Amino acid sequence: MLKGTIYFTIRQLIFVVTNFILHAYLGRKLGPELYGIFGVVSAIIIISDFVLSKGVFETLSKFVAQNEKAANGILKNALKVMTVTYIIVGAILFFLSKQIAIIMKDPELDPYIKLCAFIISIGGISTVFYGVLNGLRQFGKQAVISVFSSVIKLISVLLMVYLGYSVKGAILGIIISEAFGLSLAAILCRIPRSNVDFDGKEMVHFSLQMIVIGLFASLVMNIDLLALKIIIRNNFEIGLYTSATAIARIGLLLMYPVSLTVIPTISKSLSDGDMTHTEHTIVHALKLILMFVLPISLAIMASSKNLIFLLYGEQYVPASSALNILMLGMIFFSIKAVLYNIIVASGWPRYIMFLGVLSLGVDIFLLLYLIDKYGIVGAAAASAITHLFGLVVSYIYVSHKYLKRIIPVYFVKIVVASIIVYLIAVLYSPNGIMLIIYYGLLLVIFFAILIIMREIKLQNLKLALAKAWKTDRTDRMTDEFPL
């Protein structure tokens, strides 16, 4: 699991950097109103794409991990079915774009939504290759695809907007990067032929459940922005909120290195009947996600005004209050996402479906009540409360089924170290580009505190890193990470 996490960490760091540059440029170049439109369009893309992509990715990851010899057959069948499916979904979105724009109470969204249809179709087909590679635990190839796609996206979007194509140019740039990613994924996903059978009916049944989960998960993640568009209809305010969500989702981006390696690793350990290793994997996954997300999220909360000013400029600074609440929500969401993937890997997606329906209901109720009273701050609060609800319920389930301690010692130590980092950032946070360097220093302080607390043992970490890169692939991906 460690090497996969390292690959995904490198991938996500590059993605975070390119994503921040892209959003900061768009926010400054387009201004809050046009940037708000881009934010709404992005939410529509994420919801539409995530509904199918999440189900396909996690299904292929799980079933390929359980039966690697059938990977070639699984890939071919999935490509046939999902290519047709994604093209149909894209066509539906294209022809219903006008009606969706009317629902959003902004007819100007129509041409943008039409362009979104191409992103969903191309990106969806790429997901088939990503899912198979993840199931085979070929995380290096996934990282290569993601890194090159991120760089191409940054260059193409910035170029199209610079040439004067505004929001349409940004969407066209994303289409270019998705097409590049699909081509690279098809080239790298080369699997030897085999005649091993697999249970196609079980896979389809599982994928349908995951698609439903994806629907509710994507709505819970993005419905706040859409609700703002429908309720307040102020593109300037929506632009402010878009800037806050773009920064807040650093937690979402940082949790992927752990989250994406959880499903194949736990699926394999459960199929092998190794409950001891399953528990170790869950403990280390939760420990890693806390280390990735908690200190940097709290540091951003302590210096939110300075960070927004650095990235977007003075006109976006009023979004800092919403950003603080969204960062708290993203801490909850990141941990919840890992817990959800643990439950999925254990073969209980119906539990997540039920929780998704419940969470969406809670979110809609809170949004309707809080946006009307508090605007973008109310939308952020509704999102944070909903993620906290999902976190608590899913942790109760996972801890009851797999874990021995309700509040583990590592949790207390990581929280204490993160709070110390937060207090330091509150006392002093620099302006300008030095703020980014300062975040790096705060992370060094965070890990130094954990070393002093003996939560991280340097000798064990050194051995784990050596083992991760020297053993064969299967051992590498299932080995314990002894911090």
Image: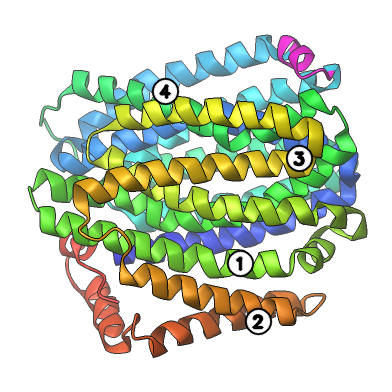
Q: Is residue 378 left or right of residue 108?
A: left
Image depth: mark 2 or mark 4 in front: 2
Q: Can residue 395 be spotted in the picture? A: yes
Q: Closer to the camera, 134 or 55? A: 55
What are the residue bounds of the magenta stretch?
98-106
The residue at 47%/45% (across/down) is 184
Name the element at disc 4. Answer: helix
CA–CA distance in space, label 2 to label 4: 43 Å
Q: Which residue is mark 2?
A: 424
Task: Give the mark nearer the N terminus: 1 vs 3.
Answer: 3
Residue 43: x, y in percent?
A: 66, 33
* Magenta run includes residue 205: no
Type of amino acid at the residue the image marks with label 2:
Ile
The residue at 67%/52% (across/down) is 325
Q: Which residue is mark 1?
A: 298
Q: Closer to the camera, 97 or 132? A: 97
CA–CA distance in space, label 4 to label 3: 29 Å
Q: Closer to the camera, 173 or 41? A: 41
Q: Is residue 35 above or below residue 17?
A: above
- The picture quadrant where one finds residue 97 is top right
Task: Give the mark nearer the N terminus: 4 vs 3.
Answer: 3
CA–CA distance in space, label 1 to label 2: 10 Å
Task: Give the mark nearer the N terminus: 3 vs 2.
Answer: 3
Name the element at disc 2. Answer: helix
Type of amino acid at the residue the image marks with label 1:
Leu
Q: Is residue 83 above or below residue 372?
A: above
